[in-house]
Image (tube, grey):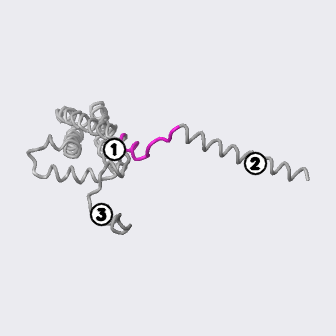
């Protein structure tokens, strides 16, 4: 077999597979990607609609929302941006980000237009983009433990508490 240093070099030399280090299942990864694409479509349409006004803050929020849509498409669905040379490079770099980094980026990106112009269009237009960030944030929290391991931990804790209680009662009896 390989000696441990050689195995470490081989593991460090290859690009990090997102599924190996972030613990996301394939279906959850696709759920996040689909939410990102739907969020991009939502941001694009709502941003365009937001620009049809004379209020400069609404126009700024609409332009930001369309930029959000572009970034979401670039990071989550680079095949939608085949006419852009750097789309695959940006997507590959975005795939290397940890889920909590994507969560912070997407949520922050979605909150900014709402802070610029608080309207129903900006709220609903950015809701799915924000939800994409929330999905990535939930994946950063990790998998939920199974009921068996929780029951085992609870049983051990209960047993330790009973031992402490009987130990203190025996100490009082003497």
> Measured along the vertical axis of the image, is residue 94 above or below residue 131?
below
Image coords of residue 67 (percent x, y): 20, 44
Q: Report how far apart the C-alphas of labels 3 and 1 lie in the structure.
A: 35 Å
> Measured along the vertical axis of the image, is residue 80 above or below residue 89?
above
Relative side of 53 to 144, left or right: left
The reply to whether discs 2 and 3 touch (Cβ–Cβ < 8 Å) is no
Q: Quadrant of residue 44?
A: top left
Q: Nearer the viewer, residue 73 or 160?
A: 160
Q: Which residue is mark 2?
A: 163
Q: Which residue is mark 1?
A: 107
What label does residue 68 carry, if any? none
Q: Report how far apart the C-alphas of labels 1 and 2 lie in the structure.
A: 48 Å
The mark that comes first in sequence, 1 or 2, is 1
- Farthest-out residue, right: 174
Q: Quadrant of residue 72?
A: top left
Question: Residue at coordinates 28% horizontally, 38% vertically from top-left?
Answer: 30
Q: Nearer the viewer, residue 62 or 14?
A: 14
Q: What residue range appears in magenta? A: 135-146
What label does residue 10 carry, if any? 3
Q: Quadrant of residue 81?
A: top left
């Amino acid at each position: 077999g390989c000696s441990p240093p050689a195995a470490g070099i081989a593991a460090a030399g290859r690009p990090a597979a997102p599924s190996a280090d972030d613990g996301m299942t394939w279906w959850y990864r696709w759920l996040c990607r689909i939410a990102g694409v739907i969020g991009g479509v939502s941001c694009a349409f709502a941003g365009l609609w937001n620009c049809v006004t004379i209020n400069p803050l609404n126009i700024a929020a609409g332009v930001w929302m369309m930029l959000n849509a572009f970034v979401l498409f670039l990071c989550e669905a680079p095949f939608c941006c085949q006419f852009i040379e750097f789309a695959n490079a940006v997507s590959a770099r975005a795939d290397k980000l940890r889920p909590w980094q994507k969560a912070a980026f997407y949520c922050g990106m979605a909150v900014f237009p709402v802070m610029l112009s608080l309207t129903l269009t900006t709220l609903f237009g950015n809701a799915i983009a924000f939800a994409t960030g929330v999905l990535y944030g939930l994946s950063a929290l990790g998998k939920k433990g199974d009921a068996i391991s929780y029951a085992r931990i609870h049983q051990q804790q209960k047993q330790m508490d009973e031992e402490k209680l009987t130990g203190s009662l025996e100490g009082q009896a003497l």
